[in-house]
Amino acid sequence: MLTSNQLSEFREIGFLHVGRVMSDDEADTLCRRMHAVADGQQEGAEAVRNLNGDQENIVVQIVNIWQADPLFRQHLYHPEITAMAAELMQAGTVRVWHDQVQYKPPRTGGPTYWHQDHPYWPVIQPADLVSCWVALDDADEENGCMWMVPHSHHFGPYCGGTIGTNTTTWMPAPDQESLSSGLEVNAVPCPVRKGHALFHHCLTWHGARPNRTERGRPAIAVHYMPGWTRYEKEPGKAHLVEHHITVKPGEILQGEGFPTVWENGKPCPSPR
């Protein structure tokens, strides 16, 4: 599915644009379904909230929208996406940790502050997950596409995952004393067309600027974990979807709340 050059690129810089994974019509349908869940017309998602808590800087987050809508559940099992996730993680088994929509509305869409993903998931180890971020409409520099710091997944976990953000330039502003000498923090934009996908490693630094355009910026991210991911809880910390976990600490994380989407070298059938 992926070329050797693509695999090498991902391992080197920590993210990879893989091109189109769904048609414009399919993306439009998912976008309409997303708005229905966000507006309360469909229930069942783990959470629907404004991440920033600020009406001038809105980022609508929907966690586990697959629990609310069958088309989003079907998206988890996308055979091309799951095949690429398996290749990137070199995993024979792939499960879903959780999904999330992040929608930046026109004019009032807020920023995504610079962070790593895995430190915000303090109940799973090791840090081998990859995320597939699919644009449900064009995401560009003007309306708040993601930016990535190449090679940053090699830096290791950073201060609980929060990098620090310069709110004038919207560039990462890390505590230099927390970084090893010689590390270069050079962020690059990652525009993604409607129906196209961008993968990133769970330790890759990423963020996004506000959306002040007349266009929304809808996207669906699925966080895929390899079959060896364990339930390992950090003392005093929790996660929103932790109540779905039925295994004991130290055991492989699996169960109905974490669908298996790839196994034995082939995609699992999507439930209908």
Image: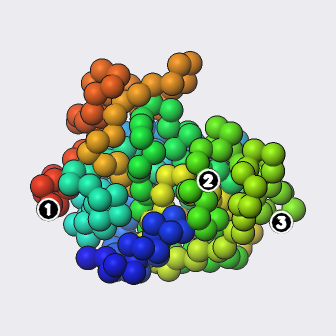
The residue to which callout 1 is attached is 266
Q: Is residue 164 left or right of residue 222?
A: right
**Residues packed near mark 1 inside 10 Å, few (<14), some (14 to 19) or many (20 plus):** some
Say what amino acid the circle numbered 1 marks. Lys
Residues under labels 3 and 1: Cα distance? 44 Å
Circle 3: residue type: Thr
Question: Are discs 2 and 1 less than 8 Å apart at CB?
Answer: no
Task: Identify residue for label 2.
Answer: 155
Residue at figure coordinates x 48%, y 62% from the top left: 200
- Per the image, the residue denoted by label 3 is 169
Residue 23 sits above or below residue 217 on the image: below
In this view, which residue lies farthest toward the right? 168
Distance in Å between CA atoms under marks 2 and 1: 32 Å
Find numbered disc 3 in the image and state the secondary structure of the residue it sits on: loop
User: What residue appears at the point 56 percent right and 56 percent down from the top-left corner?
Assistant: 154
Q: Is 219 drawn above or below residue 97 in the view shown?
A: below
